[in-house]
Amino acid sequence: MNKNIPAFLISTLSFVMLSCNSSTSSNANENEVKTDSIYPPVETNPANTSYKPFQEGQTRAPGIKTISDFTFSIVTEQLESPWGMALLPDGRLLITEKAGTIRILSNEGTLSNKINNLPKVDPEGQGGLLGITIDPNFASNRMIYWVFVEPTPEGNHTAVAKGKLSEDETLIENAEVIYRATPTYKGKLHYGGRIIFDKKGNLLVTTGERSDIETRPQAQDLNSALGKIIRITTEGKPAEGNPFVNTAGAKPEIYTYGHRNIQGIAIHPITGDIWETEFGPRGGDELNRIEAGKNYGWPVITYGLEYSGKEIGTPPIQVQEGMEQPVYYWDPVLSPSGLMFYTSDEMPEWKNSLFIGGLSSTHIARIVIKDNKVVGEERILDKEGQRFRDVIQGKNGEIFAISDAGRLYKINKK
């Protein structure tokens, strides 16, 4: 049965219901939404396709605007192609640079010298040193974990390494590679690259399907680590309880599959749900709520086109039984990279909002989620003209954002 439904119109009543809820939610799954008027969707450009969303609210949600005054400043412009950030217990930031070094940003805004002694990276194309996180027990063990593109004579692949930050913070001690997302491939695109800890102390690692027509089908292949979310221990072993540990022919480290190129992953502070953002092709960037063992569809279903404008699939389909629909998608694209949930009381109306760094869209998207649906979207720092690669919440409720041009922004209450 064809599950596509006719196009829908969002009525004025819908805007009122979605945009004007200014009270604190009594449901733990809901976010506060505070607006002083009704706003149309922030996207006004025509879509790349005429595809119809499968469900109401799946794209072009009502616009929202932050009521509270906030400001921003440029902390530094001296970073070199920064990619990922991690917050240290004392409020300082660890920042990866694509060429293969790590910097520390002090609370006063000073950058450290480059921290070296990491495994060699392949920085070509979309490769390099990518996402980073710290051990939950960093204060006592000083362990950090990072994702990088590892070169080999046969090509390259996404890899995960760990090591100890030296007491003098000048190098990484005993760095070792604990996981490699195979197969290795000769290419320069779609490595994924984010890494976070889940609630059980395991690592969630995102990979890409390496972009090319020949590798795309591996996103659907359970014997390949391409186009997946991987769940491993801090030793690089498959985590206990993974959905495919007893599936013949499947890699036991796989948590979900059918992804294109995930550069954002975060855990909702209230529900504990995992959310991710991934790049679509020309249109069809996705926001997904992640459930173990689920298939997220790429390259079988998509709301986008090839960059050439050619349709994907013959005929192109957006819905198929057994494949998850995105909670939300963008057309034209956001180019979503790092993301975070805001948890501080410093800006109450932002609490539990999702913040996403936009690359080609050159803004930070603030997304409000209610009952696992997007009910509001706002654009922040959209006048800066920057490709925002990652966002992270600071110790005092500020938001830090890095851009490909080497800037680090601080956004905070005025």
Image (spheres, rainbow, N blue to C red):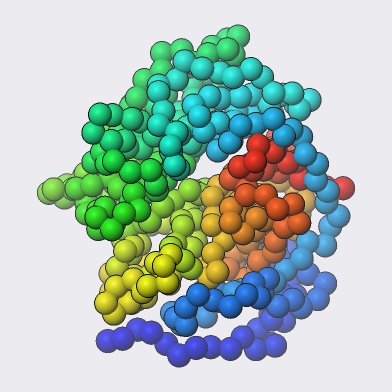
Q: Is residue 389 above or below residue 371?
A: above
* Image quarter (top left, top right, bottom left or bottom right) of the N terminus: bottom left
Indicate the position of residue 120 as horizontal and vertical percent values: 40, 23
Q: Is residue 238 above or below residue 264?
A: above
Residue placed most toward the observer, 161 or 245: 161
Q: Residue at x 65, y 31 (%)?
A: 79
Q: Residue at x 31, y 86 (%)?
A: 2
Going by the image, does 254 lie left or right of 357? left
* Residue lying farthest to the left in this orientation: 248
Indicate the position of residue 178 as horizontal and vertical percent values: 33, 27
Indicate the position of residue 324 as horizontal and vertical percent values: 36, 67
Q: Residue at x 66, y 75 (%)?
A: 44
Residue 198 visible in the snapshot: no
Q: Residue at x 43, y 65 (%)?
A: 307
Which corner quadrant of the image does residue 295 belong to? bottom left
* Residue lying farthest to the front in this orientation: 308
Residue placed most toward the observer, 302 or 89: 302
Residue 107 visible in the snapshot: yes
* Residue lying farthest to the top in this orientation: 168
Indicate the position of residue 278 as horizontal and vertical percent values: 46, 56
Residue placed most toward the observer, 46 or 227: 46
Residue placed most toward the observer, 268 or 133: 133
